[in-house]
Amino acid sequence: MRSRKVRTGVFIGLPLIATTLCTLESLRSPDDINVTSASVTLGEIVRRVIVTGVLQPVTTVDVSTQVSGTISEVDADFNSVVHAGQVLLRLDGSELQAELDQARGTLAQARADLAAARTTAERAAFTLSRAEALAAKSLIAQVDLDEARTAMTQADADVQSASARVDEASADVRTANVNLQQTVIRAPVDGVVMNRNVSTGQTVAAIQSAPVLFQIATDFRTMQVVADLDQSDVASISLGSAANFHVDAYPNQTFEGHVTEIRLDAVREQPGQDGATPRSDTQGTAMAVVSYPVIITVENTDERLRPGMTAIVTLDGARRERATRIPNSALSFVPSARILAAAHQKNPAPPPPPAPDKTGNSARVWAYDGTEFTPIVIRTGLSDDEWTELVSGPLEPGATLVTNAAIGADPASN
C-alpha cells in the first residue's frame, strides 16, 4: 500500500517539477545572458594566398645519347659534381669503329677511282687536241675527230662521277666519326648529377627518341618553388611579390622568396580529377578547376633546401590599406533559439539575407543593446584570417557587434 502511494507521488510530482523548471527558465532575465562583443575598426586587410609547391633547381639539363649501344663504363653517379666536358659514360664503340674503318676504306677507293678518271680525262684531252690539229690539215676522217670528242666528253663525266663518290665517301667518314665520338657522353655544363638512369652493361636504344641518361642541376645556391595558383588569385599576385614558405625538413624556419614568373600555361583539371575540388556555376553545373604555374625564386646559399621538397607557400594577395573592418567572429555568430527565447524575443528565426550582387556578398551581423538582439544586413568584400571588409551597411567604425553569447556561465549555449 505504501509502495503504491510512493509511485503515485512520483508520477504527480515529476510533471510539477518540470513545469516549475520551465516556468523559471521562461522567467529568466536577459541579464543572465553573457555576451561577448567586438568593435568595427579602420585598418589594413591583406588576403593571404596559401598554395603548395615543389622545390626545383632553377636550371636542369638532361643528358641524352644520339646513338644506340651497350654501356661499357659509367663514370658519374648520383650527387657527383661534374664539369663541362667531363666524361660521364662510355658506350661500346666497336661496331661504330668498324663502320668508320669501312667508310675510310670506301673513301680511299673513291679517291683512287677519281685519280684514274682524271688520268683518263687527260689522255682523252691530248687525243682530242691532236685529232683537231690533224683534222685541220684534212689528215684524218671526220669520224675519227667525232670519236675523240665523244671520248673527251665521257672522260669528263667519269671525273665528275668519281668526284661525287669521293664527296659521298667523305661524308660517310665524317658521320661514322661523329657516331663514334658520341659513344663518349660528356657533361654539357658544370653542375651536380641529380639523377642517373643507366648502369654498366645496359643497352640503350636511340631509334625513336633520345633516352635521358643523366639529369644535371647547374646550381643549388638558387632554387625555385613551382606552385599552382588558382585563377581567382592570379589578378592579386604580381611579379616581385614577396612570398614565404615552410618545408617539413625545417618546421621552425620560414624561408623567403619572391615571385619571378606567372606562366600563361593554364592547368585545367576536371571536377574530381586528381583530387580537384568540384566547383559549380550559378546553374549548379560542375566547372573545371583552372590554375596557373607560379615560380618563386629563393636564395639557398647554405644549400639546405633540396630538390623535390614540398613547400607550403604564403603569398600576399589583394590588399586594402584603410578599410572599415568587421571581425570574422561577428560574421559567424548567429543567436540560437534558446538565446533569443532567454531575451524574450518573439522572432527566433529571422529571414535570410538577400542574394549577393555586384557590390559585395550579403551577410548578417548582430547587435545587442542589453535587452534585445538586432540583426543588421550588410555587404562584405575582401577578407583575411581575422577581418572582413564592410562594403555597405548601417555600420560605422566603433560600432559594437556580438561575437558570442551564452546563458549564464555556460559558454556552449549560444
Image (tube, grey):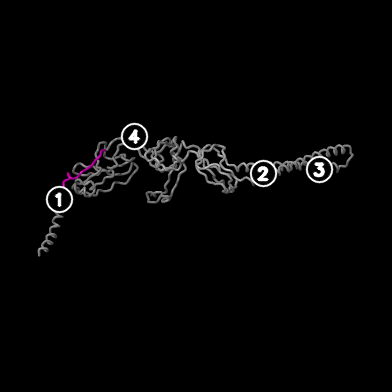
Q: Which residue is mark 1?
A: 24
Q: Sequence-wise, which precedes: disc 3 or disc 4?
A: 3
Residue 391 seen in this snapshot: no
Foreground: 370 or 410?
A: 410
Q: Is residue 334 left or right of residue 89?
A: left
SS state under label 3: helix
Residue with the mark numbered 4: 321
Pointer 2 with pointer 4, Cβ within 8 A: no
The mark lying in front, picked from 3 and 2, is 2
- Could you tell which of marks 2 and 1 lies nearer the N-terminus? 1
Secondary structure category for the residue under label 4 = strand
The amino acid beneath tag 2 is Leu
Cα separation, mark 1 vs mark 3, equals 135 Å
The alpha-carbon separation of the residues under discs 3 and 2 comes to 37 Å
Q: Is there CB contact under 8 Å for labels 3 and 2?
A: no
User: Label 3 crowding class (10 Å Cα cut-off): few <14, some 14-19, many 20+?
Assistant: some
Q: Quadrant of the N terminus?
A: bottom left
- What kind of residue is marked 3? Ala
